[in-house]
Image: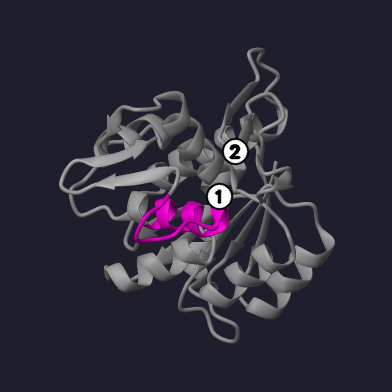
């Protein structure tokens, strides 16, 4: 597995490098955005860890660059600030996870493993009972593909897992806590708006009317329901 690290704080980048290397990942470590972009263009990556405040192109810009190029590998953002606006911006641009500095390197390694598990499953899952169809929306569990009226919907692995969980539990109200803990496989925190941002992105890709969505309904104060 090839993992990119971008952080202009050399001590942090070097520390993360050591921990990931000890887990037998191939690590591409950079202190500048220009070097990281060159790596993104020329190396088949499986995951990227991006510091938001890096000089040159910042982490948000590089995250957008990765998604605009069509790469779907997981992106973990690093930030020294705890601000919801930054978190929402990163997730909206296509980031999969967020870690605030200072962090425990073992926690970062766990997040990397979790993200890679989801990504690998997204690309290689071969389970049967593959296809769910609902009013023009087709979710293929085996191929991890989504079609709407025969048009491919380009979902990230995380977005696909969220939609799959909701459609599998059609008609049931799913709380943000249940959705987070079943998709992310981590403990949910009340201040976590990750679920909300991902739901919004899925709705946008499905062309949903925000005031009257066809597929994913918000049950205010409770959660979400696929109708």
The magenta-colored residue range is 197-213
220 horizontally vs 179: left or right: left
The reply to whether the magenta stretch includes residue 43 is no
Front-lying residue, 78 or 175? 175
Q: Closer to the camera: disc 2 or disc 1? A: 2
Task: Give the class, few, some or many, for how many residues have Cα within 10 Å of label 1's Cα (few <14, many ≥20).
Answer: some
Question: Residue at label 1?
Answer: 18
Please provide percent x and percent y for residue 199.
41, 51
Looking at the rendering, which quadrant does residue 193 occupy? bottom left
Question: Residue at label 2?
Answer: 137
Please provide percent x and percent y for residue 24.
65, 37
Tell me the quadrant of the picture where the C terminus can be found.
Answer: top left
Is 59 situated above or below 184? below
Q: Secondary structure at mark 1?
A: helix
Name of the residue lying farthest toward the right: 42
Residue at x 81%, y 57% (from the top left corner): 43
Please provide percent x and percent y for residue 86.
36, 72
Tell me the quadrant of the picture where the N terminus can be found.
Answer: top right
Q: Earlier in the sequence, mark 2 or mark 1?
A: 1
Front-lying residue, 24 or 139? 139
Front-lying residue, 13 or 70? 70
Residue at x 27%, y 71% (from the top left corner): 83
Looking at the rendering, which quadrant does residue 166 occupy? top left
């Amino acid at each position: 597995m090839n993992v990119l690290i971008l952080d202009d704080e050399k001590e942090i980048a070097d520390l993360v490098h050591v921990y990931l290397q000890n887990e037998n990942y191939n690590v591409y470590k950079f202190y500048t955005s220009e070097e990281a972009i060159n790596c993104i263009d020329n190396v088949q990556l499986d995951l990227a860890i991006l510091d938001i405040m890096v000089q040159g192109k910042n982490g948000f810009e590089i995250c957008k660059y990765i998604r605009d190029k069509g790469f779907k590998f997981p992106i973990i953002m690093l930030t020294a600030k705890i601000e919801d606006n930054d978190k929402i911006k990163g997730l909206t641009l296509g980031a999969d996870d967020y870690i605030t500095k200072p962090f425990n390197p073992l926690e970062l390694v766990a997040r990397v493993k979790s993200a890679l598990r989801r990504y690998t499953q997204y690309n290689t899952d071969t389970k049967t009972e593959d296809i769910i169809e609902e009013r023009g929306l087709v979710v293929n569990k085996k191929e991890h593909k989504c079609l709407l009226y025969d048009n491919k919907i380009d979902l990230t692995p995380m977005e696909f897992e969220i939609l799959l969980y909701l459609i599998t539990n059609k008609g049931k109200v799913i709380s943000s806590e249940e959705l987070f803990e079943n998709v992310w496989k981590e403990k949910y925190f009340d201040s976590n708006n990750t679920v909300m941002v991902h739901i919004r992105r899925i709705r946008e890709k499905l062309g949903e009317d925000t005031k009257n969505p066809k597929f994913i309904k918000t049950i205010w104060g409770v959660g979400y329901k696929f109708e």
